[in-house]
Image (spheres, rainbow, N blue to C red):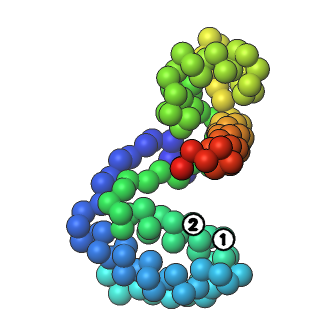
């Protein structure tokens, strides 16, 4: 995988193709593996097998493209900069540095630069999301028991 990040916003034709393709492939989303045929515009064709989880990734990609979104694929063992980590968590870089220095998220330094494993960022994000959802559920239950009309 290339380390360069390319941003490509899909064209209207690409969005239409992604919508049609995702509808076709969605029928096979719950299978363990799928045999596929591919034919390029140059006339060459091949048959191959995709594992079910790869098919789901492909469907997720097509779904985002059909919504007009650009996408990026990043390996889980990838290390990211503090700015990239802050962007993933949707927080400021100084706030992220406080989380790192406070021991909330593991990191290491390369020279003077902090590096964070993407998997650690995603794990932290999942934990925070779960806590947030639990707090919202508790707040909702409390407001209902108090007859607040929510």
Work out whether residue 73 or residue 130 is closer to the camera in this orientation and state it.
Answer: 130
Mark sitting on residue 57: 2
Residue 16 seen anywhere in this rendered image of the structure: yes
| Residue under the image location 60 percent in, 80 percent down | 29
| Disc 1: which residue | 53
| Residue under the image location 32 percent in, 76 percent down | 17
Position in image of residue 9 (x %, y %): 30, 54
Mark sitting on residue 88: none
Position in image of residue 97 (x %, y %): 61, 17
At label 1, counting other C-alpha atoms closer than 10 Å, the crowd grade (few under 14, some 14-19, many 20 or more) is some
Residue that protrudes farthest toward the front in the picture: 147
Q: Are marks 2 and 1 in contact (CB under 8 Å)?
A: yes
Q: Is residue 120 above or below residue 144?
A: above
Q: Secondary structure at mark 1?
A: helix
Position in image of residue 128 (x %, y %): 67, 38
| Residue under the image location 42 percent in, 62 percent down | 64
Q: How many marks?
A: 2
At label 2, counting other C-alpha atoms closer than 10 Å, the crowd grade (few under 14, some 14-19, many 20 or more) is few
Q: Quadrant of residue 115?
A: top right
| Residue under the image location 44 percent in, 67 percent down | 63
Work out whether residue 119 or residue 51 is closer to the camera in this orientation and state it.
Answer: 119
Relative to 80, 18 lies left or right: left
Residue 130 seen anywhere in this rendered image of the structure: no
Work out whether residue 146 or residue 54 is closer to the camera in this orientation and state it.
Answer: 146
Residue that protrudes farthest toward the top in the picture: 112
């Amino acid at each position: 995988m290339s380390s360069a990040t390319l941003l490509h916003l899909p064209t209207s034709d690409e969005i239409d193709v992604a919508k049609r393709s995702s509808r076709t492939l969605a029928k096979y989303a719950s299978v363990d593996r799928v045999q596929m045929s591919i034919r390029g515009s140059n006339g060459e064709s091949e048959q191959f097998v995709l594992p079910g989880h790869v098919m789901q990734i492909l469907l997720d990609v097509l779904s985002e493209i059909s919504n007009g979104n650009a996408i990026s694929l990043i390996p889980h063992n990838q290390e990211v900069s503090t700015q990239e980590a802050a962007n993933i968590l949707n927080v400021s870089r100084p706030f992220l540095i406080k989380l790192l220095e406070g021991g909330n998220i593991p990191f290491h330094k390369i020279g003077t630069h902090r590096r964070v494993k993407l998997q650690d960022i995603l794990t932290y994000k999942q934990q925070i999301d779960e806590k947030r959802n639990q707090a919202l559920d508790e707040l909702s239950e409390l407001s209902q028991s108090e007859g607040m009309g929510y």
